[in-house]
């Protein structure tokens, strides 16, 4: 390309540095104005190459200017604004496991965890009996298998799911490891996005929208870190797209692993039927004008 053509081109050359060894997904990459100076930094949730290499990294160009160790693999990463000050300083939200980790000025600030789900009474009773020594490992496995067939794996706690997936030779050791901990039904966060609360201005307050493995979609107040509203869909969310303002009117589009897209509107508590069913896997969703493309 000639120099004159290059200077007027609308294309921006991407930075390339294979030596950085980054391992991540598109959902764990964002741009954020972390210092309110108009200079947007590249923020990446790096999976690393080993268990202890998982980090939140901030780049200026190809130079790492900040890093924080993450305790679990990130599923999503977004920047958001939760302050009415100028210049506004973006905060970061990282979905790790069943929690959202909030960072301000690249420092840990808050940990938000969606509420626990109700545990099936028969499942809870089975774990109480095995802890009291009334039943053994084989009997516990038989009870959980029966519940699995009756309810489906999504209705069981992660402890029961892990126990059922383990080898027979490992069940006794797994049982001893978890008996002293409380049985909880936490759901893993699968995806996350943001939506403006009351104003469409770039510096206005954001809400965080997150979805979990069990089909719950939560809208979170980023100032009080409480749940503003929640909605249930019959599927496992993979991608989220939010349009509108929370306090005016909005649409949240949710695509699932079954290649279905659901639309959540204001004041909805559950959505049963998808608006679109695809014949191929959905790899992402974007908005073009008034259309959502996938």
Image: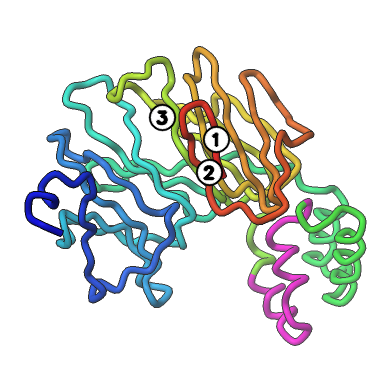
Do the CB atoms of the residues marked 2 and 3 lie less than 8 Å apart? Answer: no
Which corner quadrant holds the N terminus?
bottom left
**Residue 142 - label:** none
**Residue 292 - label:** 1
**Secondary structure beneath label 2:** loop
**Secondary structure beneath label 3:** loop
Which corner quadrant holds the C terminus?
top right
Within the image, what quadrant is residue 65 found in?
Answer: bottom left
Left or right, residue 184 beside residue 47: right
Residue with the mark numbered 3: 222
Residue with the mark numbered 2: 285
Within the image, what quadrant is residue 67 found in?
Answer: bottom left
Left or right, residue 8 beside residue 242: left
How far apart are labels 1 and 2 at the CA level?
Answer: 7 Å
Residue at x 31% of width, y 19% of height: 201
Q: Residues within 10 Å of mark 3 (few under 14, many from 20)?
A: many
Do the CB atoms of the residues marked 1 and 2 lie less than 8 Å apart? Answer: yes
Q: Residues within 10 Å of mark 2 (few under 14, many from 20)?
A: some
Q: Residue furthest top?
A: 248
Residue at x 41% of width, y 24% of height: 196
Residue 163 within the magenta-colored segment of the rendering: yes
Residue 260 within the magenta-colored segment of the rendering: no
Q: Residue furthest bottom?
A: 169
Left or right, residue 13 beside residue 118: left
Q: Residue furthest left?
A: 3
Task: Give the number of the mark in front: 2 or 3.
Answer: 2
Relative to 240, is 291 above or below? above
Where is residue 8? Give x, y as percent: 14, 44
């Amino acid at each position: 390309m000639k120099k004159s053509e290059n200077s007027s081109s609308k294309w921006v050359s991407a930075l390339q540095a294979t030596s950085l060894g980054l391992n991540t997904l598109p959902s764990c990459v964002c741009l954020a104005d972390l210092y309110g100076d108009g200079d947007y930094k590249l923020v990446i949730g790096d999976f690393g190459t080993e268990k202890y290499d998982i980090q939140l990294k901030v780049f200026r160009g190809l130079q790492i200017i900040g890093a924080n160790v993450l305790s679990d693999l990130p599923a999503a990463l977004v920047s958001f604004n939760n302050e009415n000050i100028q210049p506004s300083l973006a905060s970061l939200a990282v979905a790790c496991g069943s929690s959202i980790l909030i960072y301000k000025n690249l420092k840990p600030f808050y940990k938000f965890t969606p509420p626990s789900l109700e545990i099936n009474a028969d499942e809870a009773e089975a774990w109480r009996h095995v802890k009291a020594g009334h039943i053994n490992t084989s009997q516990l496995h038989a009870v959980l298998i029966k519940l699995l067939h009756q309810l489906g794996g999504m209705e069981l706690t992660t402890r029961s799911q892990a126990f059922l997936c383990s080898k027979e030779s490992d069940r006794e050791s797994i049982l001893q490891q978890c008996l002293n901990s409380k049985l909880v039904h936490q759901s893993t966060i699968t995806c996350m996005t943001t939506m403006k609360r009351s104003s469409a201005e770039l510096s206005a307050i954001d809400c965080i929208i997150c979805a979990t493995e069990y089909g719950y979609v939560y809208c979170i107040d980023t100032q009080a870190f409480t749940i503003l509203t929640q909605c249930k869909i019959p599927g496992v969310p993979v991608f989220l797209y939010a349009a509108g303002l929370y306090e005016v009117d909005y649409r949240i589009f949710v695509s699932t692993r079954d290649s279905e897209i659901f639309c959540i509107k204001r004041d909805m508590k559950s959505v049963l039927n998808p608006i679109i069913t695809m014949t191929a896997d959905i790899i992402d969703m974007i908005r073009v004008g008034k259309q959502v493309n996938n």
